[in-house]
Image (cartoon, rainbow, N blue to C red):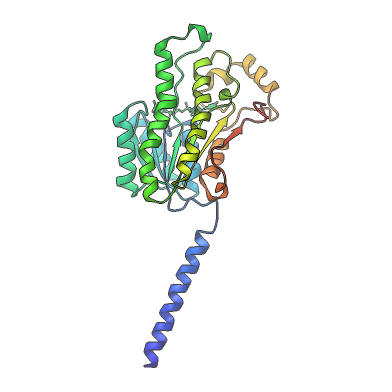
Amino acid sequence: SSLQVMWRTALRCVKANCVFAHRRMSQSPSSLSGKVAIITASTDGIGLATAEALGRRGAHVVVSSRHQANVDRAVNLLQSHNIIVTGTTCNVGKAEDREKLVQTAVDHCGGIDILVSNAAVNPFFGNIMDSTEEVWDKILAVNVKAAFLLTKLVVPHMEKRRGGNVVFVSSVGGYQPFPALGPYSVSKTALLGLTRALAPELAQSNIRVNCVAPGIIKTRFSAALWENEDLMEDFQRQLCIKRAGRPEEIGGVIAFLCSDDASYITGETITATGGMGCRL
Ligand SMILES: NC(=O)c1ccc[n+]([C@@H]2O[C@H](COP(=O)([O-])OP(=O)(O)OC[C@H]3O[C@@H](n4cnc5c(N)ncnc54)[C@H](OP(=O)(O)O)[C@@H]3O)[C@@H](O)[C@H]2O)c1
């Protein structure tokens, strides 16, 4: 009947509009809408700013760090900014914690699209020749090995979603070792290599692997640097932008790398240093 024809036409119209609206929504290449992002060490500093940046672009963010109280504080803060967030404790140096983090993301968010490996420790200041085996074991285990092992855990989940993004947080010290931070700097150099070693293999799974190398960013981690006026004066001479960076100035770079705006970038490290020279 003509009524049925009218109904069918109306339905087709609605369907077409839905598809159109969906295309329009997914058109912004900087959007992370519908993505699930794990960010390690994300209850303060660069990690928290990254969770905020990914969350503002529509991702469901999974925040974590060692202490439950810090996790709760970060979850509340992000929720108050209307970000979809899940929180759990995770010391990235512990295998059972890494597994719990990945399982939490899968159970609560339905899968994983993005891993930002941001956790790092530095238990040693001084002449590199005074550093001990214990120092090296700790630094390499947390800063390098855990970054790889977490990647290995998330890749099968990214493959289920037919692609994904991994971003490592290195440091300008990975290019030019900081004075008195030898072992830490070397661990950050290792992440530049890890980025390049993983990129070709994971490209086959449509997973991009990139890295960001921040300069001096004002966080608790770097307080020993920016609270020391003599040291900062010395650093500022090397800067074009004569101030320490803000955590959100790294979060934005990471969000870019995880977005479709960066769809042809892999195996790359972006330095965000206020113009501190560290490579050609
Ligand atoms: N700030 C800089 O100038 C600068 C420059 C270059 C690179 N970076 C790199 O940026 C990353 C973040 O540093 P940040 O300056 O943002 O530090 P931050 O502000 O001090 O924050 C550190 C975060 O890491 C968590 N954390 C510490 N150890 C952890 C572990 N073993 N497992 C999981 N979480 C842990 C802390 O929470 P809990 O205490 O609750 O665990 C906290 O949320 C690091 O990789 C660092 O090397 C920093």
Residue 275's place in the image compared with 108, above or below, is above
Q: Is residue 135 left or right of residue 172?
A: left
**The quarter of the displayed image where residue 14 is located:** bottom left
**Which residue lies at the image location 57% right of the left edge and 30% below the top edge?**
214
Position of residue 215 measured from the top left corner of the image (x, y, whole percent) = 59, 27
The answer to whether residue 159 of the structure is visible from this angle is yes
Q: Nearest the camera: 235 or 223?
A: 235
Residue furthest out toward the bottom: 1
The answer to whether residue 64 of the structure is visible from this angle is no
Position of residue 279 measured from the top left corner of the image (x, y, whole percent) = 65, 28
Question: Which quarter of the rendering shows the C terminus?
Answer: top right
Q: Is residue 261 left or right of residue 64?
A: right
Residue 239's place in the image compared with 256, above or below, is above
Question: Which quarter of the rendering shows the N terminus?
Answer: bottom left
Position of residue 255 measured from the top left corner of the image (x, y, whole percent) = 52, 43
**Which residue lies at the image location 56% right of the left edge and 43% below the top edge?**
265
Q: Nearest the camera: 72 or 253?
A: 253
**Which residue lies at the image location 58% right of the left edge and 36% below the top edge?**
249
Q: Nearest the camera: 215 or 85?
A: 215
Question: Number of labelled discs?
Answer: 0
**The quarter of the displayed image where residue 94 is located:** top left
Position of residue 80 measured from the top left corner of the image (x, y, whole percent) = 43, 44
